[in-house]
Amino acid sequence: MTEGIGSARAPANIALVKYWGKRDERLNLPEAGSLSVTLEGLEAHTTVRFGPSHPRDQLILDGHALPEVGMRRAVRILDRVREVAGVPHYALVQSTNSFPTAAGLASSAAGMAALALAASRAAGWDPSAEEASVLARLGSGSACRSIHGGFVEWIAGSREDGVDSHAVGVASPEHWPLEATVVLISEGEKPVSSTRGMAETAASSPYHAAWIGAVRHDLPVARAAVLARDFDALSAVAEGSCLAMHATMMAARPALCYWKPGTLQTLDAVARLRAEGRRMFFTIDAGPNVKVFAPPGDPDGALGALEALLPDKKTLRTRTGPGGSCVDETVSD
Ligand code: DP6
């Protein structure tokens, strides 16, 4: 092979039952499973070019070259693809995000899933969805869920090599097209990465074991709620999982708190609107932003009412969306 090129797009996903704890840091193997919803329109678009003219792996994200330390995750994926497909070349990777990077909007999940799909295509390898999910996981754990659309479960697996730790589709986007708004509290980089936050929580939080137990309990409850389209049941389990994850990290020593005053202001607004009978639920990842979901078509006008209560906050509308895929258009600078 002289040159190989491949492009892909992949969406962000938001966990409703969260991943926060690894049993293997190198392979991003989780202590427990997790369940997410894939989000429409919040995407990474990535083009990979393998070839003899590249003196090293290089990643250009939104027009800026990433320093070598920022490339480690990407290189794990590129190395694995080179190994499987027998490609002897370095790669030039160009990627753009349609949403703020590293603001708790799962940008690394979208980016690593798009990279996994684009790099395999560029190497002439056509992985199964399972293999693509395992590959994306090497870059960032939650990325394994962005391969699929709709509602997605990451099966924790038990093997040491991680080949059984991948995502599977639970239900398609059409099964239950939930509406959502992302309330942007801060668009800056988060101060503590998920990787570090998880390690510190597992090492020092007195609640860590209880948290992992709660995830194992919540997973089948959330899966059943999705399959039955039971919004109230999903609301209870998703908010419970989110708050339990943040509680366990707040109890770590030193404490880890991603929330800002605007985070609580948004939770308060959700509580007020719900008290008026509008159906909605919130979730928060490793950042201050709040994602709020409403049933299909948002019959109570919950999201508009929330946005009206928070006039100084930027919001992004989205809904249950499709998974990642290879595309023909290429990304260039
Ligand atoms: C709070 O997948 O970003 O969003 O595997 O270290 O890259 P690494 O972590 P990452 O963690 C995501 C944490 C979370 C919860 C979730 O998405 O399940």
Image (cartoon, helix red, strand yellow):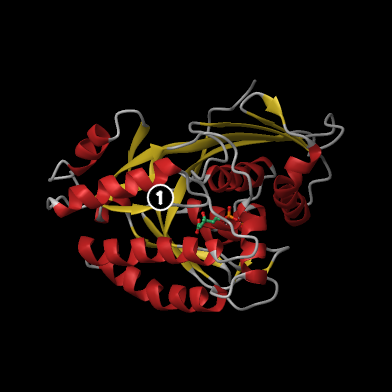
Left or right of 270 in this view: 106: right
Q: Amino acid at mark 1?
A: Thr
Residue 36 versus residue 73 in the image, above or below: below
Percent of width and height locating residue 42:
44, 38
- Which residue is found at the position 33% from the left and 67% from the top? 237
User: Residue under circle 1?
Assistant: 38
> Which image quarter is the C terminus in?
top right
Q: Quadrant of ligand 1?
A: bottom right
Q: Is residue 5 visible?
A: yes
Residue 223 versus residue 142 in the image, above or below: below
Percent of width and height locating residue 53:
84, 29
Q: Secondary structure at mark 1?
A: strand
> Which image quarter is the N terminus in?
top right
15 vs 245, nearest the viewer: 245
Q: Is residue 321 visible?
A: no
Left or right of 135 in this view: 148: left
Density class for disc 1 (Cα within 10 Å; few <14, some 14-19, many ≥20) is many
312 vs 281, nearest the viewer: 312
194 vs 40, nearest the viewer: 194
- Which residue is found at the position 53% from the left and 74% from the top? 207
- Which residue is found at the position 44% from the left and 37% from the top? 185
Left or right of 19 in this view: 242: left
